[in-house]
Amino acid sequence: MGWWKKNNPDPLDQRSKALKSQLSNLEEEIRKLQSQVDQPATQPRHRSTVRPQSPPSRRNPSAIPKEPVFEPVDRWQQKSETPPTGPHFNDLGVRKYDLLATLRRFKDHFRGPSSNNPKLVSYLAAGSINGLRPLRYEKRVARNRFILLSVFFVLILWGILAMIFNQR
């Protein structure tokens, strides 16, 4: 079926190329600004001529951090908060049997791991990326193929069994 289609460019590859070029432009701008900061000022800058000119104050160069400071980004990471199930130890210090936690672990075992990027999963499921079909459409196509092939194999098996039993 893919022989008659035109080769459409992948929108994810296009987006990644655009982001890489934007990143390289930003890195180049950072290098330019860093070189401007590293160069000593040749003339002191004054904000206004109304105020008397005083010698410019020099900031302590050791106070400027050499490495970039990154803030923690927790808004994209989903933190699963388990509801409190009460104290886990009895009066003697022996651990209690926690039935709710056991059921939760059992359900999580069959649920499977969560995705690393839930936002991308929601985009794929909704079909929000141009050029890609929604995941529900792809599921429907796969389900219909499975049903059709199952019916086909049942008919073949029925034909073979009918031939075997008609020979007797």
Image: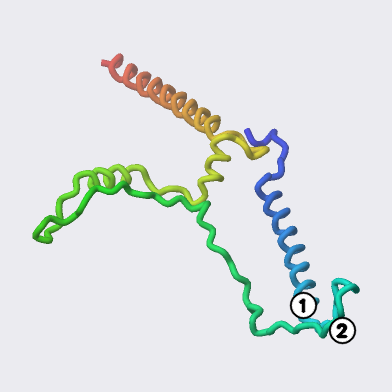
Quarter in which the C terminus is drawn: top left
User: Which residue is pictured at 64% across the width and 81% down the height?
Assistant: 63
| Left or right position of 77 against 45 | left
Give the image location of residue 43, x and y in percent: 88, 82
Kindly identify the amino acid type of the residue bearing the numbered disc 1. Answer: Val
**What residue did someone put label 1 on?**
37
The image shows residue 18, relative to residue 57, as above or below, that is above
The quadrant where residue 160 appears: top left
Of 80 and 61, the residue lying toward us: 61
Dot 2 amino acid type: Thr
Q: Position of residue 15 (x, y in %)?
A: 69, 50
The crowding category of the residue bearing disc 1, from other C-alpha atoms within 10 Å (few below 14, some 14 to 19, many at least 20), is few
**Quarter location, residue 9:** top right
Where is residue 25? Give x, y as percent: 77, 63
Residue for point 31% across, 46% down: 83
Relative to 137, is 149 on the left or the right? left
Q: Which mark is residue 60?
A: none
Sequence-wise, the earlier of marks 2 and 1 is 1
Total of numbered circles in the picture? 2
Q: CA distance from mark 2 to mark 1?
A: 12 Å
Residue that badge 2 annotates: 42
